[in-house]
Image: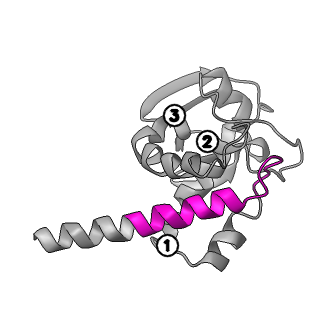
Amino acid sequence: MNITMTLNGKKISADIDADILLIDFVRDHGCYSVKRGCETSNCGLCTVFLDEKPVLSCSVLAARADGRTVTTLEGLQEEAKEFGAFIADQGAEQCGFCNPGFIMNALALFRENEYPEEEEIREYLAGNLCRCSGYEGQLRGIQAFLAWKKEKSGKESEKS
């Protein structure tokens, strides 16, 4: 079957098997930030945006993305760069395997709620697997990022 989608801003068409998962499709097209970590849709490592909403690409057939927009971390470098530095500053990345999925889910959270409270952060990111750090570094990184963003926003409004 032939599908067409916009992947990270680039329109692509491909002939696929009907049972290929979106994770395999995007990895076949060079998006290696998307990881397979569990085979059971429980780890969050395969998170991508499908029409701007986070989905687990290991649970979605590529055919479901026909005519739609798929964005991986490779397509969000500017947005992710700012936030990712705060995660790194906390040493939260350790092995780095979970970072792409974690960052995708954090960016999705920020899009839904620009300044989430700690409990909302914990709840939203509960589906992300991290074997190294126990999430406290990620939480500190998110809180530092949000504090910086608020401060930056306040300084920008003072200039106006």
Q: Residue at x 54, y 67 (%)?
A: 143
142 inside magenta stretch: yes
Badge 2 density bin: few <14, some 14–19, many ≥20, Cα 10 Å: some
Give the side of residue 160 with respect to residue 43, left or right: left
Tag 3: amino acid: Glu
Quote the CA–CA distance across marks 1 and 3.
Answer: 23 Å
Report the front residue among 11 and 78: 78
Classified by dominant secondary structure, the portion drawn in magenta counts as helix
Figure quadrant of residue 95: top right
Q: Residue at x 47, y 74 (%)?
A: 115
Residue 109 seen from this side? no
Quote the CA–CA distance across marks 3 and 2.
Answer: 18 Å
Work out whether 151 lies above or below 54. below
Report the front residue among 126 and 46: 126
Badge 1 density bin: few <14, some 14–19, many ≥20, Cα 10 Å: few
Tag 1: amino acid: Asn
Front disc: 3 or 2: 3
Work out whether 39 lies above or below 13. below
- Give the mark nearer the N terminus: 1 vs 2: 2
Q: Residue at x 67, y 26 (%)?
A: 27
Instruction: Give the residue pinned by disc 1.
Output: 113
For label 2, the SS is helix
For label 1, the SS is loop
Instruction: Give the residue pinned by disc 3.
Output: 74
54 inside magenta stretch: no
Instruction: Give the residue pinned by disc 2.
Output: 65
Figure quadrant of residue 94: top right
Work out whether 129 lies above or below 127. above
Q: Residue at x 49, y 73 (%)?
A: 113
Q: Which residues are magenta?
A: 128-148
